[in-house]
Amino acid sequence: MNQRYFSLSEYFNNNYKDKVYKLSINAGFTCPNREGDNRGCLFCSDFGSGEFGGSVEKTISKQIEEQKEFLKKRKKTNKFIAYFQSFTNTYAPVEKLRRLYYEALNCEDIVGIAIATRPDCLSEDVLDLLSEINKKYFLWVELGFQTSSEKTAKIIRRGYNNDVFLNAVNSLNERNIKVVSHVIFGLPFEKKQDNINTIKYIKDLGLWGLKIHSLFIYEDSDLKNYYIENKFPLLEKEEYINIVCDALEILPEDLVIHRLTGDGEKSRMIYPEWSKDKLSVIGGIQKELKIRDSYQGKNYIKN
C-alpha cells in the first residue's frame, strides 16, 4: 500500500494503471422502505443518498455524457464507472434493470458499473442479471448495513435484520460479485465498542470493499427531529478519527477502502460542524495512523 490503507484509487491504479472516476447516476428508482407510511431510513436524505447525482429527468446516457465531459475538463482521464447511487437500484422489474444497466455499460469510456441497493432487494432474477453482467464487465454491488446492532437498526429504521444482510452477501459471493458494505459511526446512542463490533461482524464476510461514513444531520431530515427530541451525543472529530483508525487496524489489508468519512451536501448539513470538512478528517486519519506507526490490517486476526 502506498498509503497506510488500501484505497479505491490505489486499487484502480494497480488494475488500470490510470485514474478511474465514478459518475453518479439517478435512474429514477425509489425504495421499499419509503412505501406506504414508511419514511425510509432515519438518516437518508430526500435524494436517497444521491445528492451529487445526475438529473432524473435525463436519460442515463445523457447523465453520463454531461458528467464525463465536466470531469474531462478537470481531470486527465478517459475511464469511468457508472455509479447507480440514488435510492435502491435493484428495486424494479428485471427487464427494466437490464435496459438501464446496459445503457450505461454501452456508453463510451465506461469501464464498469457500481450498483447501490438494499440487501432485501436482491431476488433470484436480479442476482442472475448481476451474475451475467459480472461475467462480462467490471461490477460491484453496494449494500447499506450501517451497524451490526439490531437495537440501533430499529432506531434508524433500517427495515431488515442482520441475517438478511448476511444472506445477500453470501448470495453475491457465491456468484463472485464484488460486494461493498456501508457502515456509519456516530449513530444514535452507539459507543465506540458498538462501532468496533460492527467492523468485527463484517471483516471476515468476504467483502471486496468498505465505505465508512460519519453521521451527519441535514436541516430538513427526520434525523434532525430525532436528535432534537432525544439529544443523543454526537461524535467529536478526534473521537471519529480514533475510531476509524482502530477499525482500519483490524480489517484485512486487502479490503478496498472506498471512503473514510461522509460526503454530504454542506449547505444542508447542520451537525456536526466538523463533518463539512472532509479533507481535514481524512488528513487527521492519515496523521493519526502515522503517529501510531500503524496501518490497515496491523491488528487483523481472522475469526
Image (spheres, rainbow, N blue to C red):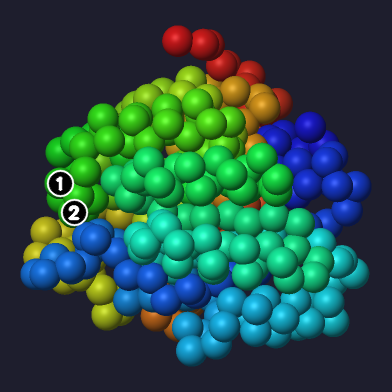
Work out whether residue 252 can be spotted: yes
Element at label 1: helix
Give me the residue at 69% from left, 55% from top.
112
Give me the residue at 33% from left, 50% from top.
121
Marks 1 and 2 close (CB-CB < 8 Å): yes
Crowd band around label 1 with a 10 angstrom C-alpha radius: few (<14), some (14–19), many (20+):
some
Q: Relative to residue 4, is residue 272 depicted above or below?
A: below
The residue tagged 1 is: 154
Give me the residue at 48% from left, 34% from top.
172
Amino acid type, residue under disc 2 in the picture: Arg
Q: Position of residue 91 (x, y in %)?
A: 35, 60
Amino acid type, residue under disc 1 in the picture: Lys
Crowd band around label 2 with a 10 angstrom C-alpha radius: few (<14), some (14–19), many (20+):
some
Is 63 in front, or is 210?
63
User: Along the horizontal axis of the image, is 15 left or right of 290?
Assistant: right
Q: Relative to residue 178, is residue 34 depicted above or below?
A: below
The residue tagged 2 is: 157
Q: Quadrant of the C terminus?
A: top left
Q: Position of residue 95 (x, y in %)?
A: 45, 62
User: Along the horizontal axis of the image, is 280 left or right of 274?
Assistant: right
Is 221 in front, or is 129?
129
Work out whether residue 232 can be spotted: no
For residue 177, the mark is none
